[in-house]
């Protein structure tokens, strides 16, 4: 398994041209000092693809090694042939030129270069594209072991899907979240927070937490913002809650970082927890949330 950071990509060396000696007396220009090749996503994408092409042997894809092979790994023309794209277009991608790369073309490149699951995901992230082979979480069942895990946690714990519906929770979570996980109610965390009066009473500093929750959902839903269930949820909340409509229109974005959570519980009074969120390695659209009592 390989890990990459954009700051680790090496530059491409160019052959220096003959310069007038008087040029050394002038101030350096941007042409004399080009930006590093990882300065743009297109260049980072090209570096990533090139590195994996160079480490893939011809024999690995069923090609003869051939005499006098000047480049390590496969030639660009060979990868282009395997992908069913033009050699010129493939070369431009590797050179970091701002050309359009569709999800289908990227998928063929991933197959041709025999990328691992993590490497393929990284490729699509660099290209800001959604992998067409990515399973639709809405049609996939949550792993049974994940749903069972919440029952093993000796603290409030629950599992959320991509629209933040609770798929599983334990008794401690049901006891804490009055009006959401107890009884038979709508299990969506956003609907509970913005439309249930019990949420305003339970969640300390509701205005701050609710604004933060909307910002977290915007960041979390960016990859499936146009999916019908997500769009329907946003539209219905915008109609049902003036607060949600206002927070959503603000375009605030925030990561789901966890941290201190305070509640005004109807039985236990003021209680404080430290919230921790986990994402399963193979189902990052799901979340396991655990609250540890301080």
Image: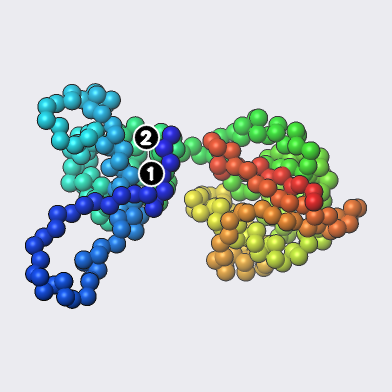
Q: In this view, does 248 lie above or below 104?
A: below
Residue located 83% across and 46% down the image: 175
Residue that badge 2 annotates: 115
Q: Residue 249 carries which label?
A: none
Q: Residues within 10 Å of mark 1 (few under 14, many from 20)?
A: many
Residue located 41% across and 44% down the image: 4
Of the numbered discs 1 and 2, the one sitting upstream in the chain is 2
Q: Is residue 117 above or below residue 252?
A: above
Check if mark 1's residue and mark 2's residue have beta carbons within 8 Å: yes
Secondary structure under badge 2?
A: loop
Answer yes or no: is residue 165 visible: no
Q: Which of 219 and 64 is in front in this view?
A: 64
Q: Position of residue 111 (x, y in %)?
A: 33, 33
Quadrant in which the N terminus is drawn: top left
Residue that badge 1 annotates: 123
134 sits to left or right of 292 = left
Q: How crowded is mark 2: few (under 14 residues within 10 Å), some or many (20 or more)?
A: some
Residue located 34% across and 49% down the image: 9
Q: Where is residue 40 in the image (x, y as percent from the top left)?
A: 34, 58
Q: Nearer the viewer, residue 283 or 186?
A: 283
Secondary structure under badge 1?
A: helix
Q: Which of 206 and 281 is in front in this view?
A: 281
Q: Quadrant of residue 204?
A: bottom right
Residue located 73% across and 42% down the image: 157
Q: Quadrant of residue 271?
A: bottom right
> Cα distance, mark 1 to mark 2?
9 Å
Q: Where is residue 280 in the image (x, y as percent from the top left)?
A: 59, 38
32 sits to left or right of 286 = left
Q: Position of residue 20 (x, y in %)?
A: 8, 69
Q: In which quarter of the image is residue 143?
A: top right
Answer yes or no: is residue 130 visible: yes
Determine the residue located farthest toward the bottom in the rendered image. 26
């Amino acid at each position: 398994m390989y890990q990459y950071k954009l700051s680790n990509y090496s530059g491409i060396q160019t052959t220096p041209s003959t310069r007038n000696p008087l040029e050394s007396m002038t101030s350096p220009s941007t042409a004399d000092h080009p930006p590093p090749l990882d300065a743009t996503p297109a260049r980072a994408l090209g570096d990533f693809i090139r590195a994996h092409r160079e480490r893939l042997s011809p024999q690995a894809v069923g090609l003869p090694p051939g005499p006098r092979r000047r480049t390590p790994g496969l030639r660009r023309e060979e990868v282009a042939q395997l992908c069913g794209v033009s050699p010129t277009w493939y070369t431009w991608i590797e050179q970091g030129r701002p050309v359009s790369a569709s999800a289908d073309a990227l998928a063929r490149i991933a197959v041709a270069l025999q990328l691992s699951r993590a490497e393929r995901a990284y490729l699509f992230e660099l290209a800001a594209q959604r992998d067409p082979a990515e399973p639709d979480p809405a049609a996939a069942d949550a792993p049974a072991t994940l749903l069972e895990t919440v029952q093993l946690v000796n603290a409030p714990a629950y599992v959320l899907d991509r629209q933040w519906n609770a798929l599983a929770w334990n008794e401690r979570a049901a006891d804490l979240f009055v009006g959401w996980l107890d009884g038979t109610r709508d299990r969506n965390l956003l609907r509970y927070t913005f439309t249930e009066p019990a949420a305003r009473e339970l969640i300390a500093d509701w205005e701050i937490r609710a604004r933060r929750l909307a910002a977290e959902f915007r960041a979390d839903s960016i990859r499936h913002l146009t999916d019908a269930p997500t769009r329907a949820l946003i539209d219905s909340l915008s109609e049902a809650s003036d607060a949600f409509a206002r927070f959503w229109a603000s375009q605030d974005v925030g990561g789901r970082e966890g941290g201190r959570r305070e509640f005004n519980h109807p039985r236990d009074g003021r209680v404080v927890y430290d919230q921790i969120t986990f994402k399963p390695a193979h189902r990052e659209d799901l979340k396991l949330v655990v609250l540890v009592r301080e």
